Image: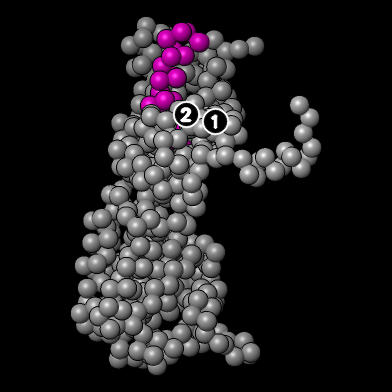
């Protein structure tokens, strides 16, 4: 059948879809419930109780720490939304402002974003960062408003800003003379050790309370995906097993990253693939293909397993074992060689010498399977550190084991 260009485009725009409301899969969407982050919300509530009970008595600072996709931003925004309404019901004026320091990574850009979010009129003449912040504080003071300012990805601000800017921001009430403390902070960082790089006089003002977020397990991801699927897809379109497949791939307890953002993105891409196939249901096969699209490096690694010889596969298996055993991202060359030697002996294979091992590692690095780097401070001597380019998952280990069992030889 011949269709006009307009017919084809019209069909794509108006055709049936598995989606009911795909905005519920957006990273910016904050759901009414946050599965498995209820305790974190309560901890934030306890931390900010003085703001409600004795407003203005002190400036509260809380750090949320954890890897990407573990719910830090969603928890902070949900908390801000709810505490603002609670405060309003008690007759207390409260603003919640969320600033991403990756986009606004200088004090000037950050303070300008604060002023813009409040629609604060600024004079035409150029103001310094400190003057803008002073204007923001005066705005709050004159109107009797308290404010919680969340600085998301605060690591970037710490890494790129001069000491005096960090000092001004964190020790605000040393710089602004005010009896009433109206500004409070939530600092969101990926790794709390990034705070160790800050001068102690500043760090002590940041690290008052730390709430740590662990990566999600497969069961936790399943609950999150179930909620999002109910909100975003039509009833009955998600085939049984899809959510379990995605949550098992990405669950921290199954070797995944525990990243809910990636898991949700995988589900969304699976929905797109179903629409592309004119399918009324999202299948596990759609989810498998979606996973490779969301994590293209994983696809490349899987494809290149067939190009590895037995020595390289045993080295890869040894690396996976070490990363899982010690729960680390990198191991030393010595550790890997020893693990490989023992594995080879267990399997009745003759271990190769150092030069051959080094060459095998070099080849796997070239194929994009491994990364190598030199050790730095904190380790005696200089040694090569080896890491995987992709997360350690059960699926990856199964494929490596399968290739080892078949005595894999590299393809032409």
Assign the C terminus to one quadrant of the image. top right
Tell me if mark 1 has few (under 14), some (14-19) or many (20+) residues whose alpha carbon lies within 10 angstroms of its own.
some
Q: Is residue 195 left or right of residue 19?
A: left
**Colouring chosen for the image of the structure:** one colour
Q: In which quarter of the view is residue 320 placed?
A: top left
Q: Is residue 404 magenta?
A: yes
Give residue 279's mark. Answer: 1
Give the vertical position of 259 relative to 71 (above or below): above
Q: Where residue 42 appears, x then y in whole percent?
A: 23, 61
Residue placed at 36% from the left, 68% from the top? 81
Residue placed at 47% from the left, 18% from the top? 313
- Residue range (magenta): 387-408
- Residue 195 seen anywhere in this rendered image of the structure: no
Give the vertical position of 210 relative to 304 (above or below): below
Q: Is residue 20 left or right of residue 33?
A: right
**Do residues under tags 1 and 2 come within 8 Å of each other at their CB atoms?**
yes
Label 1: state its secondary structure: loop
Q: Is residue 326 magenta?
A: no
Q: Which residue is mark 2?
A: 283
Q: Is residue 234 left or right of residue 86?
A: right
Residue placed at 36% from the left, 85% from the top? 145
Q: CA distance from mark 1 to mark 2?
A: 9 Å
Q: Where residue 368 appears, x then y in whole percent?
A: 57, 31
């Amino acid at each position: 059948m011949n269709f006009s260009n307009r017919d084809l485009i019209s069909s794509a725009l108006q055709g049936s879809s598995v989606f009911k409301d795909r905005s519920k899969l957006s990273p910016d969407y904050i759901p009414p419930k946050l599965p498995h982050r209820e305790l974190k919300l309560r901890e934030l509530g306890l931390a900010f109780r003085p703001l409600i009970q004795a407003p203005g008595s002190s400036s509260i600072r809380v750090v949320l720490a954890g890897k990407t996709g573990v719910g830090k931003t969603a928890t902070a925004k949900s908390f801000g939304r709810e505490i603002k309404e609670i405060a309003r019901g008690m007759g207390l004026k409260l603003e919640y402002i969320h600033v991403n320091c990756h986009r606004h990574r200088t004090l000037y850009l950050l303070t300008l974003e604060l002023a813009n979010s409040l629609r604060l009129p600024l004079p035409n003449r150029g103001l310094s960062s400190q003057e803008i912040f002073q204007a923001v504080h005066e705005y709050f003071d004159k109107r009797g408003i308290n404010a919680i300012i969340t600085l998301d990805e605060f690591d970037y601000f710490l890494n790129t800003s001069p000491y005096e800017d960090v000092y001004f921001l964190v020790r605000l009430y040393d710089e602004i003379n005010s009896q009433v403390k109206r500004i409070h902070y939530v600092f969101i960082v990926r790794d709390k050790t990034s705070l160790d790089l800050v001068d102690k006089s500043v760090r002590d003002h940041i690290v008052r309370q730390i709430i740590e977020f662990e990566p999600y397990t497969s069961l936790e991801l399943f609950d999150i995906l179930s909620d999002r699927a109910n909100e975003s897809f039509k009833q009955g379109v998600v085939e049984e097993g899809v959510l379990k497949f995605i949550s098992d791939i990405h669950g921290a307890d199954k070797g995944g990253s525990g990243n809910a953002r990636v898991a949700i993105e995988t589900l969304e891409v699976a929905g797109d693939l179903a629409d592309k196939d004119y399918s009324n249901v999202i299948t596990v096969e759609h989810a498998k293909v979606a996973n490779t699209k969301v994590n293209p490096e994983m696809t490349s690694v899987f494809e290149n397993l067939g190009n590895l010889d037995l020595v390289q596969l045993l080295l890869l298996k040894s690396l996976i074992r070490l990363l899982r055993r010690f729960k680390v991202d990198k191991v030393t060359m010595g550790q890997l060689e020893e693990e490989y030697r023992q594995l080879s002996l267990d399997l009745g294979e003759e271990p190769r010498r150092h030069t051959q091992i080094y060459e095998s590692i070099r080849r796997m690095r070239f194929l994009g399977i491994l990364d190598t780097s030199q050790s730095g401070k904190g380790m005696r001597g200089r040694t090569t550190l080896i890491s995987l380019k992709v997360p350690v998952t059960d699926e990856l280990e199964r494929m490596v084991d399968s290739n080892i069992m078949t005595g894999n030889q590299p393809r032409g």
